[in-house]
């Protein structure tokens, strides 16, 4: 089943209701096409990471949050209830984004759409790579993928949706909208 867009929330890419519904490949690819930034600075990493912390705290989500750019960790937070295992998941999901230049959830969905799994068909070490939701590429116009923002601690679709929601809000803060 696919989540239909809500006309009252036409700007948003993340469904606000029915979290059990799985997005289609087309919806996931649309998220990547639309969530592109003009730049991504150290201050942007701090602002995005802080926004993710705020959203996670509002939901009492036991997550760890990480932002990397060009191999450098720019932001990391571990909220109550998260564990060191979440950091290991963050690294594995982020490596998928770095290798495929796509969201970790989308990469896994593409393998499932072909009737397989990432673990069965990618020929990559599952202790190093995890195509589970929660890591999303940071893409800059005219440059491409420069990093990843990653969340771990919730079921994979909820991790993915939390990151996308934060990126949408962050993008809204960055881009002036015509009245």
Image (tube, helix red, strand yellow):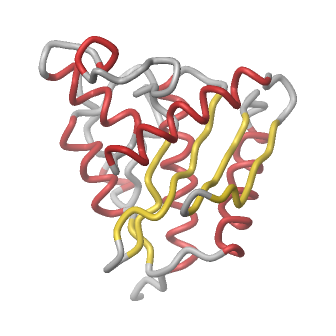
* Front one among 17 and 39: 39
Q: In this image, 39 relative to 62: left or right?
A: left
Q: Residue reaching furthest right?
A: 80
Q: Residue at x 50, y 34 (%)?
A: 93
Quadrant in which the C terminus appears: bottom left
With respect to residue 4, does 47 lie above or below?
Answer: below
Q: In this image, 59 relative to 3: left or right?
A: right
User: Residue 153: where, in percent of width, then height?
Assistant: 66, 25
Q: Residue reaching furthest left?
A: 114
* Front one among 119 and 20: 119
Count of numbered circles in the view = 0
User: Residue 61: where, in percent of width, then height?
Assistant: 73, 30
Q: In this image, 31 relative to 175: left or right?
A: left
Q: Residue at x 39, y 68 (%)?
A: 36
With respect to residue 35, does 152 lie above or below?
Answer: above
Q: Residue at x 43, y 83 (%)?
A: 177
Quadrant in which the N terminus appears: top left
User: Residue 17: where, in percent of width, then height?
Assistant: 46, 32
User: Residue 67: where, in percent of width, then height?
Assistant: 63, 53
* Front one among 33 and 91: 91
Q: Residue at x 78, y 24 (%)?
A: 84
With respect to residue 42, does 79 lie above or below?
Answer: above
Place residue 132 in its image quadrant: top left
């Amino acid at each position: 089943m696919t989540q239909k867009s809500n006309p009252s929330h036409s700007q948003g890419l993340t469904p606000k209701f029915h979290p059990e519904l799985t997005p289609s490949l087309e919806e996931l690819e649309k998220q990547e096409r639309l969530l592109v930034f003009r730049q991504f600075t150290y201050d942007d990493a701090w602002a995005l990471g802080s926004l993710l912390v705020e959203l996670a705290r509002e939901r009492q989500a036991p997550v760890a949050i990480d932002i990397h750019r060009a191999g450098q960790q720019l932001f990391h937070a571990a909220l109550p209830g998260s564990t060191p295992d979440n950091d290991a998941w963050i690294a594995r999901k982020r490596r998928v984004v770095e290798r495929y230049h796509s969201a970790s959830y989308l990469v896994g969905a593409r393998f499932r759409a072909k009737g397989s799994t990432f673990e069965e068909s990618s020929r990559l070490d599952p202790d190093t790579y995890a195509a589970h939701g929660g890591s999303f590429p940071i893409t800059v116009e005219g440059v491409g993928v420069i990093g990843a923002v990653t969340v771990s601690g919730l079921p994979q679709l909820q991790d993915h949706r939390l990151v996308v929601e934060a990126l949408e809000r962050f993008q809204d803060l960055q881009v002036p909208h015509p009245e």
